[in-house]
Amino acid sequence: MGAVYSCCFGSNEQESEHLTPDPETRRRQLAEAAERRAQETEHRGIKDPERVRRMQQKSEELERRERETGYQQPALKWQV
């Protein structure tokens, strides 16, 4: 009976050390998992994230050029 009890509840200290990592290792694993989840949610539904990044850069470059040249879109006129 004692052998079953020690096996199930890990009364041996060496066994319990291997079951739970030290706090620093556990923190690092949690940080990596959080970063991985953040990246997955950021790219959810996007087949080609690199393409999206290029499009955003192109859009930002176009906006920057428009600001530098002072280009403004003509105001829309309402006619009845």
Image: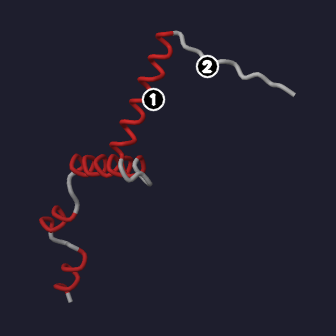
| Residue topped by disc 1 | 59
**In this picture, residue 2 sits left or right of residue 35:** left
Instruction: Answer above or below: position of 27 versus 67.
Output: below
Left or right: residue 80 compared with residue 15: right
**The quadrant where residue 45 appears:** bottom left
Which residue does the image show at 59% across and 15% down from the upper left? 72
In this view, the residue in front, 23 or 47, is: 47
What is the x, y in percent for residue 57?
Answer: 39, 30
Label 2: element kind:
loop
- Nearer to the camera, 48 or 66: 66
On the image, the x and y values in percent for residue 19 come to 20, 65
Q: Is residue 17 left or right of residue 37?
A: left
Disc 2 versus disc 1: nearer the observer? 2
Element type where label 1 sits in the image: helix
Which disc is residue 73 wearing? 2
**Kind of residue sitting beneath label 2:** Gln
The x, y position of residue 18, in whole percent, is: 16, 63
At x 31%, y 50%, the residue is 30
* Lower sequence index among marks 2 and 1: 1
Crowding at dot 2, Cα within 10 Å, few <14 / some 14-19 / many 20+, comes out as few
Image position of 34 with respect to 10: above or below? above
Q: Quadrant of the N terminus?
A: bottom left
Is the C terminus in the top left, top right, bottom left or bottom right quadrant?
top right
Depicted 58 relative to depicted 26: above or below = above
Considering every residue shown, the one lying at the far left of the view is 14
Marks counted in the figure total 2
Work out whether residue 78 or residue 41 is closer to the camera in this orientation and state it.
Answer: 78
Say few, some or many: other residues with alpha carbon within 10 Å of mark 1 (under 14 / 14 to 19 / 20 or more): few
Residue 39, percent from left and from top: 36, 47
